Amino acid sequence: MKNNEGKLECDRPLIISYSYSGNTHRIAQTIQRLTNGDWSEIYPWQPYPMAFPELLEQVKREVQSGCKPQLLPGFNLPKPYQVIFIGSPNWCGTIAPPLASWLYRNDLSGKILLPFYSHCGGVPCDFRRDIFRLCPRADVREALSVIGDGGEALSEILRKWLIQTGIMESRAFHAG
Ligand SMILES: Cc1cc2nc3c(=O)[nH]c(=O)nc-3n(C[C@H](O)[C@H](O)[C@H](O)COP(=O)(O)O)c2cc1C
């Protein structure tokens, strides 16, 4: 498929996720299955602490300072994807720093970004706003929030969201 500028684009979406304890990856994996997309996980170079008090303290510090942690070498948009799903847990009311770092390091101008996040019903967040601040030239759509890993309802929640966004119909994605 070609875009308005005549450049070749990949028909499949890309799914990028950061997850500390697995919930966001489960959501990402299900999106991958429903859309037949390509999925890539991101990891910080320096793993986060295992103990919750230290983890929380570090995350608060990073969020307050706008820290963009170094990532393990991985995915840097080798294909011209037009639609990118991006997910992380809600950490202290915003996107997790590793995802912020990935967004900051990749030029996503003109891409359609579909944010999703896992949370526990604590401090609310506005993923769309926070991602738009990092990617002001992208078309950032409304974010999907999922409690924990979404449980048994996850596929249905995602299917409805994909239809709402228009992504499921406008593209030749496979419904799994
Ligand atoms: C450091 C830290 C901060 C968190 N902050 C929030 C928060 O502000 N609001 C919320 O609803 N959940 C918060 N959570 C809960 C996670 O978003 C939730 O457990 C999520 O399902 C974890 O996803 P993951 O398994 O992909 O890491 C926080 C968890 C951690 C570890």
Image: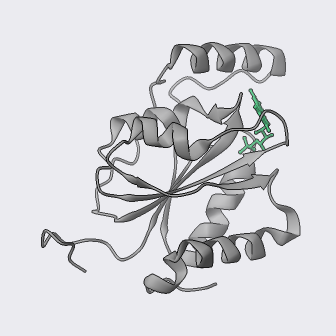
Quadrant for residue 7, please give it.
Answer: bottom left
| Screen quadrant of the N terminus | bottom left
- The structure residue drawn at horizontal position 35% and vertical position 77%, both measured from the top left corner, is 11
* Left or right of 145, for residue 83: left
Q: Nearer the viewer, residue 73 or 141?
A: 141
Where residue 86 appears, as percent x and y from the top left, is 53, 52
Where residue 20 appears, as percent x and y from the top left, is 70, 38
Count every numbered label the image shows and give the total. Answer: 0
Rendered view: 83 above or below 124: below
- The structure residue drawn at horizontal position 52% and vertical position 77%, both measured from the top left corner, is 166
- The structure residue drawn at horizontal position 53% and vertical position 37%, both measured from the top left corner, is 130
Rendered view: 161 above or below 64: below
Rendered view: 51 above or below 113: above
Q: Is residue 73 visible?
A: no
- The structure residue drawn at horizontal position 12% and vertical position 73%, both measured from the top left corner, is 6
* Left or right of 4, for residue 151: right
